Amino acid sequence: MMMLRIALAGSLLLGCAMAQGSVSEPATEQAGGEQEPAQLAAPKLSPEARAALAEARKLEKECRKVTGPARSRKLELAATAFDRLVAKFAAEPEAAALAAWSAAEVWRRQGSPPLAEKDYLHAAKTHAVRYGQRGLLAAADMQRRQQRVEDAMKTYAQAEAVDPRTSRAQEARLSMARMLLAGNQVEQAIEKFQAALESAPSARQGIDAADYLAKAWIQKGDLDAAGFVIDHAQQLVDGEKDGDPIVAEHLRRAFERMSAKKALQRAFDEQTGAGKDAAQLDEHRRREAKKEGGKSEQPAETPAGSPAEKPAKKPVKKPAAKDAKDAKDAKDAKKPAAKPGVETPVAPGK
């Protein structure tokens, strides 16, 4: 196991160093690579194509005013309008590619992955410099939504191959690895996640890849390897402490959000039985607290050898003077009245 950790450490550090060194070059110097859209000049469109695209965008904006089936219908109309422009301006590759990309985005929002896939691929083919890699990546996402695993894997691989040094290539690598893991191909998924970690263009993306890789190791049952990957993610954070404070804070937060850390702790608890012991301890504490609460409600016991305390007598309320007089008068009224001239016999002894 120690040899595995050492080998894993060497490959991770070497791979990350090479990856971050390669992406430090400006995009314009990446031979054969795809420039980011922000670095490309605005597409050159004819006045007619510009006006037609503006009209189609108006239809798209109207979708924001409605919801439910009405919104779905308006999205369909807007996407269809963009599709017509793809054919109309086939002689203008930049205009046709822009129309195809716009149609794909609307079809995606409308919930039609097959139509969105078709337009993404058309945009990637028509204008590879602007839409090559991102068009393939988006098309692969649509194929994955349709559960076409083999097609999605091939298209993700094509997207990565356009330029392995970009962030989109990293997305493609992670997507392929997640699909393998979802298909219970854990060994292959670990290899892909490992490649994604080694090729991460930035420390931030390296932390994301480490999170996935650690969870894959946990699923495989190798908790030591998972722990080492998390340690490597911590090293990525520590490596930026002396750099830009904003970047360092973002990395620290990304590391704190890694779900692999809690997953690893749960796996350790299950393996050692610590989780069960903690649950039993909590139950014992609850029972003890309940007993203590019951004792506090009972009267204190008389110590042994001391005289028992007599129960207190209930005080008898004496009637008031007026009430006693009224009672006496009522008693006298019940006695028979003495007849005139006749003595009332007196009981002997009185």
Image (spheres, rainbow, N blue to C red):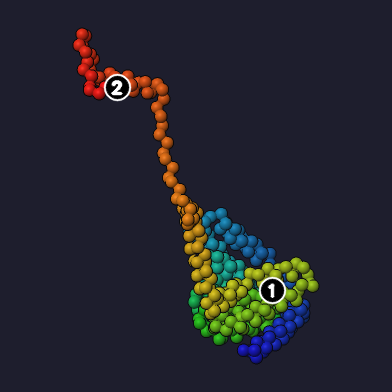
Q: Quadrant of residue 152?
A: bottom right
Q: Where does residue 297 sit, x and y in percent of width and height?
A: 48, 52
Mark 2 closeness class: few <14, some 14–19, many ≥20 residues within 10 Å: few
Q: Residue furthest right?
A: 242
Q: Quadrant of the C terminus?
A: top left
Residue corresponding to mark 2: 331
* Whether residue 186 is situated above or below residue 69 in the rendered picture: below
- The disc, 2 or 1, on the residue closer to the chain's N-terminal end is 1
Residue corresponding to mark 1: 204
Real-space Cα distance between discs 2 and 1?
103 Å
Q: Where does residue 30 sit, x and y in percent of width and height?
A: 74, 81
Q: Quadrant of residue 31?
A: bottom right
Q: Quadrant of residue 42?
A: bottom right
Determine if residue 83 is in view.
no
* Whether residue 274 is situated above or below residue 340 in the rendered picture: below
Q: Secondary structure at mark 1?
A: helix
Q: Residue at x 50, y 66 (%)?
A: 284
What residue type is disc 1 on?
Answer: Arg
What residue type is disc 2 on?
Answer: Lys
Q: Give whichever of 4, 61 is nearer the camera.
A: 4
Say left or right for 199 vs 304.
right
* Whether residue 31 is situated above or below residue 260 in the rendered picture: below
Q: Secondary structure at mark 2?
A: helix
Q: Residue at x 21, y 9 (%)?
A: 340
Determine if residue 333 is in view.
yes
Mark 1 closeness class: few <14, some 14–19, many ≥20 residues within 10 Å: many
Q: Where does residue 38 sit, x and y in percent of width and height?
A: 72, 70
Say left or right for 289 vs 258.
left
